[in-house]
Amino acid sequence: MNRKLAVALILALVAAAITVACDGGKAATSGKTIKSANSNGLTITLASDTGEIKSGTNDLYLIFADESGKTVDVGAASLKFHMPAMGLMAEMNDVATLTTTDTPGRYRARVHMDMAGTWEATVNYQGPKGTGQATMSVTAK
């Protein structure tokens, strides 16, 4: 093997190792299930590395799967959390920022939960699998 090819291969391996190290392998991970719901024949799963949501900033996964458990592309998706008004406390709404991953049907979600308590998570999607919505009650600790 010539020297230039060997150097190119080594640089490619180093770049791949850095990418995996910086990402922490999260792109391929679905995490532990927090809650799941069904919509139009799809299972929609909200997950995190710990299986929990906490007060403050959270990195979550939103996963859409068909009846066989295979992830499926749903196109555009959104995730928001709602806590109704209680007593003197006003209602709260926290919207997650979704980013796609290398796996169609698997999204990363980042959201800041204003406080601990019970929230209603609403997922909307529109695309190749039609239009749908699912809600699930989740607890932030």
Image: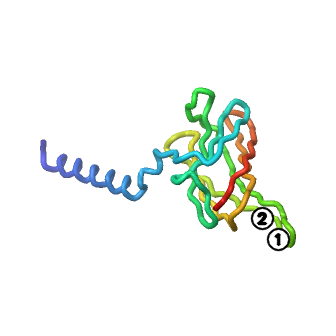
Q: Is residue 109 above or below residue 124?
A: below
Residue at figure coordinates x 68%, y 64% from the top left? 116
Quarter of the image containing the C terminus? bottom right
Residue 90 placement: quadrant = bottom right
- Numbered disc 2: secondary structure: strand
Outermost residue on the bottom side: it is 88
Q: Which mark is residue 78?
A: none
How many angstroms separate mark 1 from mark 2 (CA)?
9 Å
Q: Nearer the viewer, mark 1 or mark 2?
A: 1
Q: Position of residue 105 (x, y in %)?
A: 58, 40
The residue that mark 1 highlights is 89
- Tell whether 133 sits left or right of 19: right
- Tell whether 95 sits left or right of 4: right
Outermost residue on the top side: it is 68
Q: Residues within 10 Å of mark 1 (few under 14, many from 20)?
A: few
Residue at figure coordinates x 47%, y 48% from the top left? 27
Outermost residue on the left side: it is 2
Visual colour scheme: rainbow
Amino acid under disc 2: Met
Amino acid under disc 1: Met
The residue that mark 2 highlights is 92
Residue 22 placement: quadrant = bottom left
Q: Position of residue 93 (x, y in %)?
A: 76, 62
Q: Position of residue 10 (x, y in %)?
A: 22, 51
Quarter of the image containing the N terminus? top left
- Numbered disc 1: secondary structure: loop
Q: Position of residue 42 (x, y in %)?
A: 67, 33
Do the numbered discs 1 and 2 sit on residues whose CB atoms are within 8 Å? yes
Residue at figure coordinates x 66%, y 57% from the top left? 96
